[in-house]
Amino acid sequence: MPRLLTYRALNFILVLIAVIAMAFAIFFLQNYKGFEPCPLCIFQRIGLMVMGGFSLIAAIGNPKSKAIQLLLWLGSMAGIGWSTAVAARHVWIQHLPPDQVPSCGPGLDYWLDALPMRQVINQVLAGSGECAEISWRFLGLSIPEQALILFSALVLVNLLVLWRILKNKTA
C-alpha cells in the first residue's frame, strides 16, 4: 500500500482519473447521451485537463527537485481548484429559483469571436439558462453535482501529493 502513495503514483492516479472523467464526459454524456456541454461544463473540463497535464508531467518526469515538484503541484491544484469552483457555481445556478435563473444567451463560440477573453470569462461564470437545466441524474445527483464531488476528491488527492512533497518521499 505505501507504494500507492508515492509522489509518482499519486500523480499517475490523478492522470488516470482525469482521463476516465474526460472519456465519460465526451463518449458517454456527449456522444452516447447526446448532451452538448454548456459553457460552465466546458470550463470545468478545461480545469480538469490542466490538472491532468501537470500531473502527467509530474508522473512521467518524477522530478527530484522540491521546487519543481511544488511548481507542478501548483499547476495541478490551480486546474482542479478552478474546476471545483466552476462546478460549485454551476450547482448553485441549478438550485436557483426559476425566476432568478439567468436568461439563455449566445453560445460560447459567439462570445469567443465577439468579446475579449476577460469578458468571455465573466459571461460564462455568470451562467445562463442552459446551465440551470438538469438533463440527467444519476443516484439523484445532476451532472454538475457529480462533477463537484469528483473534483473535491481530486483536490484531496492533490493535497496528498503536497503532503508527499513536504515529506520529501519521491520514490
Image (cartoon, grey):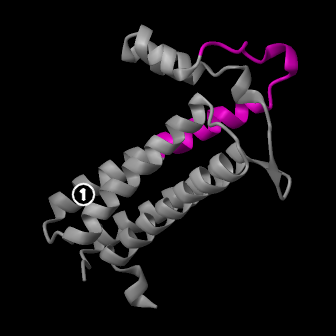
Q: Compared with residue 146, is residue 11 higher up or lower down, i.e. above or below?
A: below
Count residues near mark 1 (Cα–Cα under 10 Å), then give few for <14, some for 14-19, many for 20+: some
Q: Is residue 51 magenta?
A: no
Residue furthest left as drawn: 65
Residue 167 pos. (x, y %): 29, 74
Q: Secondary structure at mark 1?
A: helix
Q: Is residue 124 visible?
A: yes
Quick check: 74 left or right of 135?
left
- Amino acid carrying label 1: it is Leu
Numbered circles on residues, count: 1
Residue 58 pos. (x, y %): 26, 65
- In this orientation, which residue lies closer to the viewer: 112 or 140? 112
The residue shown at (24%, 57%) is: 70
Residue furthest top as drawn: 114
Q: Compared with residue 28, is residue 86 higher up or lower down, i.e. above or below?
A: above
The residue shown at (55%, 58%) is: 23
Quick check: 119 left or right of 35?
left
Residue 25 pos. (x, y %): 60, 51
Q: Is residue 77 visible?
A: no
- In this orientation, which residue lies closer to the viewer: 115 or 110? 110
Q: In the figure, residue 84 lies in which quadrant?
A: top right
- In this orientation, which residue lies closer to the viewer: 57 or 29? 29
Q: In the figure, residue 57 lies in which quadrant?
A: bottom left
Main secondary structure found in the magenta portion: helix
Q: Which residue is mark 1?
A: 70
Q: Give the magenta-colored segment's residue range.
A: 81-106
The residue shown at (47%, 62%) is: 19
